[in-house]
Image: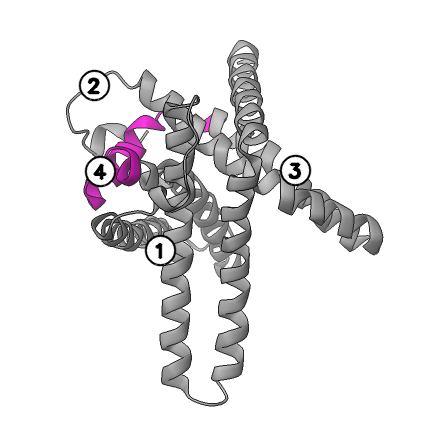
Amino acid sequence: MIDFLKESTFAVNEVISKAWTVTKRNYFSIATLCFLMFITSNASSLMAFFLSEVNKGLSILMSFIFVMFYFTINLSLFKYIFHVLDDEEHDVSIVSTIPTRKQIIRFLIATLYFMLCIVGVYSVVILIAFPFIYTGIRLDLITNVAISVGVIAIFITWIRISFFPFFIIDKDLPPFVSIKFSLATTRGNFTKIFLLLLVLLGFHLLYLFFSYIHWPVVAFFVNILSSFIIVPLSSVALTIAYRKMMNEYNSDDEPDIIHNII
């Protein structure tokens, strides 16, 4: 177990080290795309808030448009990082990384599959917990345990299948196939991905901590550092992690779900 954790930690350090080099070399382009995502997200919330008082239908329409912009920029960011990783010698323009209409549609359909997987996993946990109601165990205890197990199951499922956008952008795979490949390539890599996310989310946790203890100035600077350094670094690190997992994946066949769940 200790050797496994050492190996996982080393792999995470390797990913972050390479991500830092790539981010530093292409910082302004990557940070610009991240900033556009930030602006789009906040503009969507503000627009929906103000238009909700005017027209509900218009508010929903504008929210949908902003969500589409957000997803497009997010996919452009991943596509830009792929270009940078594949061709480090030449500059890549942001315009050339705009995803195709087919890729956007596939991403939206895969996102729907993603949400159905999350709901399905939680539903299975609840169904398994349901017979215990008749065992005489207190109902509130059963409910708390079921919710806790359900949240853990959702978190594991989220990590296992959340790499599907990379397969759509990098391999041009269909929606459900991208979900299956994400499940297959993350098999055996859960600890590494979890440690990587833990490192990348560290600054956000620090921000929440300093906000909780009412140190607003420190929390502000931690949030600024997180927004302008950690967010771009995270996007690059996850893309590099995907590439490493894909390089280690040996099968050329389309994976099935049953043999890759555990």
In space, the residues marked 2 and 1 are separated at their CA atoms by 39 Å
Sooner in the amino-acid sequence: mark 1 or mark 4: 1
| Circle 4: residue type | Asp
Mark linked to residue 172:
4
| Residue located at (49% from left, 47% from top) | 33
* Residue 196 location (% of width, % of height): 54, 30
Q: Which residues are magenta?
A: 167-191
Q: Are marks 1 and 3 in contact (CB under 8 Å)?
A: no
Q: Residue at the location (49% across, 38% down)?
A: 235
User: Dot 3 surroundings within 10 Å: few (below 14), some, or many (20 or more)?
Assistant: some
Q: Secondary structure at mark 2?
A: loop
State the residue at coordinates (38%, 77%). 60
Could you say which disc has been placed on residue 251 in the image? 2
Residue named by callout 1: 130
**Which mark lies nearer to you, 2 or 1?**
2
Check disc 1: other Cα within 10 Å, few if <14, some if 14-19, many if 20+: few
Residue at the bottom extreme of this rendering: 54
Q: Nearer the viewer, mark 4 or mark 3?
A: 4
**Which amino acid, mark 2?**
Ser
CA distance for labels 2 and 3: 35 Å
User: What residue did someone put label 3 on?
Assistant: 202
Q: Nearer the viewer, residue 37 or 139?
A: 37
Residue 240 in picture, x, y percent from top left: 44, 27
Name the element at disc 4: loop
Give residue 159's quadrant in the image: top left
**Furthest residue in direction left, as rendered:** 253
- Quadrant of the image occupied by residue 253: top left
